[in-house]
């Protein structure tokens, strides 16, 4: 008894245990068995990555800031030229032969999170049909998004639609449900999550693939199929890669708006569009969405093209940019038209079949100076020429006649006191002439008639 008491006193009065800094040892000793049990349990209950050997080269391989990862199953694995044909963008092909959406989650740490890529192209789920419901696949894809968003927030995630291959005809419902769900994931989440419709370039119509797109097995793509996929994907990746230069990242601006059904109409432009309060109702029943950004220039149009326009896959887009270019360091109408041309080409390459309406730069009283007048007239002439050269997909709408008595002589009550922005009466006048113009284009697209007729 004396022995036990003396031992107790020894531990009680030793200076080490009288120190407050040693108190952390007590809960550690008490909970060590619990920590050990939880560690073993989690190791057993969470599936391990079944491609540990296959991904070793990815882990050990070179990787630099700004690289792009292609992550997916067999379709990505077989894309042998992915690492070279997207130059100057650097693409790392992390495809795993036979991988599904569960593998995407169990291997996410080694395949995506360790590298912190600027863009991740995600293509999993096409092989899920035999082992999972569409809703389970979508839950996994949502979990993947949240993992990337929370642990690699600087990465942009692109969900690629499941291919409507000939063999997938037997699982149409699964494919369509997952693709619709992927689109909604992008609609409900960060502006840095995008949906890429891979089927648009591979089909004549829905579920009717072009010839020579798929191999004889009816599942995997031919080199021709990959080439067409690359043609539509490259502008998208390039736009995303330069997207950090977009100056308008405040969540109140246009590109933070929720997605809407594909095939509708966007009004994109500067304050003339942004202050058009009746734009989304005046053209009913046409489905118009106002994505104007006050102060935007043609430089911003290009830098923000992904967020403002392409991610929504519109059927038609009305663009009003160029007016604010007079305030850029270099007043150059040729550069402004070149940027408008590049804007059109980016839209056309990434959203096949889109119709773009370029609205004329307004001859506002503020612009009625020698240098500004010349700039406005030259830009409008350049836009006319751009539309004439691409007459099936680009159209010029001159808004000035609705606002003027004669060129550079506006009607009374058309401009506000700042001599730049429009009054509600002015918007009403433009709507009267623009509504039949848009309606005609819309009807022709829906009936398949020559849109230039």
Image: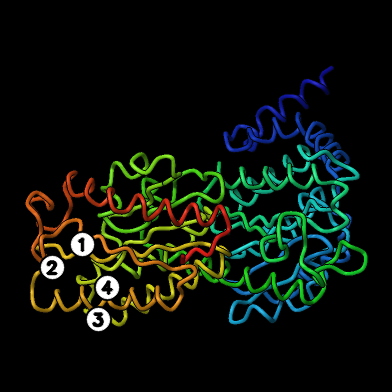
At x 61% / y 74%, what residue is drawn? 64
Question: Of label 1 and label 3, which has the lower sequence position?
Answer: 3
At x 12% / y 53%, what residue is drawn? 415
Instruction: Find numbered disc 1 in the image and state the secondary structure of the residue it sits on.
Output: helix
Q: Which residue is mark 1?
A: 400
Q: Could you say which disc has been placed on residue 380 in the image?
A: 4
State which quarter of the image contains the N terminus: top right
At x 47% / y 57%, what residue is drawn? 316
Give the CA distance from mark 2 to mark 4: 13 Å
Q: CB under 8 Å between callouts 4 and 1?
A: no
Give the CA distance from mark 1 to mark 3: 21 Å
Q: CB under 8 Å between callouts 2 and 1?
A: yes
Task: Give how far across and how far down residue 443 sits, in percent.
Answer: 49, 52
Q: Residues within 10 Å of mark 2 (few under 14, many from 20)?
A: few
Task: Give how far across and how far down residue 86 sits, in percent.
Answer: 64, 78
Q: CB under 8 Å between callouts 2 and 4?
A: no
The residue nearer to you, when weighing 46 against 252, is: 252
Q: Which residue is mark 3?
A: 332
Instruction: Find numbered disc 3 in the image and state the secondary structure of the residue it sits on.
Output: loop
Q: Which residue is mark 2?
A: 407
Give the CA distance from mark 4 to mark 3: 13 Å
Q: Nearer the viewer, mark 3 or mark 2?
A: 2
Relative side of 362 to 221, left or right:
left
């Amino acid at each position: 008894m004396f022995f036990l008491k003396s031992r107790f006193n020894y531990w009680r009065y030793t200076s080490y245990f009288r120190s407050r800094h040693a108190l952390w040892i007590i809960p550690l000793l008490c909970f060590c068995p619990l920590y050990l049990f939880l560690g073993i349990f989690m190791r057993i209950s969470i599936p391990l990555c079944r491609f540990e050997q296959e991904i070793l080269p990815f882990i050990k391989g070179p990787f630099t800031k700004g690289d792009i990862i292609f992550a997916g199953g067999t379709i990505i694995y077989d894309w042998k030229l992915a690492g070279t044909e997207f130059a100057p963008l650097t693409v790392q092909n992390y495809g795993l032969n036979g991988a599904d959406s569960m593998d995407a989650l169990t291997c996410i740490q080694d395949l995506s999170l360790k590298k912190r890529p600027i863009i991740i192209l995600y293509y999993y789920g096409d092989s899920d049909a035999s082992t999972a419901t569409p809703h389970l696949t979508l839950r996994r894809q949502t979990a993947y998004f949240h993992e990337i968003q929370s642990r690699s927030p600087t990465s942009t995630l692109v969900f690629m639609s499941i291919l409507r291959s000939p063999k997938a005809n037997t699982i149409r419902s699964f494919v369509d449900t997952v693709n619709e769900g992927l689109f909604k994931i992008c609609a409900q989440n960060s502006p840095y999550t995008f949906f890429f419709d891979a089927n648009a370039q591979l089909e004549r119509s829905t579920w009717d693939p072009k010839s020579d797109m798929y191999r004889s097995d009816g599942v995997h793509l031919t080199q021709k199929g990959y080439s067409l996929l690359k043609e539509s994907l490259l502008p998208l990746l390039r736009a995303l890669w330069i997207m950090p230069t977009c100056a308008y990242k405040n969540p109140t601006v246009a590109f933070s708006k929720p997605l809407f059904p594909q095939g509708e109409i966007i009004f994109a432009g500067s304050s003339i569009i942004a202050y058009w309060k009746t734009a989304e109702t005046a053209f009913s029943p046409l489905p118009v969405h106002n994505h104007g950004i006050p102060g935007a220039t043609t430089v911003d149009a290009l830098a923000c093209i992904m967020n403002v326009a392409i991610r929504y896959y519109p059927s038609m887009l009305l663009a009003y940019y160029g007016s604010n270019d007079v305030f850029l360091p270099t007043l150059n109408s040729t550069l402004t038209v070149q940027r408008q041309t590049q804007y059109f080409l980016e839209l056309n390459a990434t959203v096949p079949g889109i119709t773009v309406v370029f609205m004329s730069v307004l001859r506002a009283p503020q612009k009625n100076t020698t240098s500004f007048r010349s700039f406005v007239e030259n830009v409008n002439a350049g836009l006319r020429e751009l539309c004439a050269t691409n007459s099936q997909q680009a159209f010029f709408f001159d808004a000035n006649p609705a606002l003027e008595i004669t060129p550079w002589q506006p009607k009374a009550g058309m401009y506000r006191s700042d001599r730049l922005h429009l009054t509600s009466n002015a918007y009403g006048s433009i709507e009267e002439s623009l509504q039949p113009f848009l309606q005609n284009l819309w009807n022709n697209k829906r009936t398949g008639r020559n849109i230039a007729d």
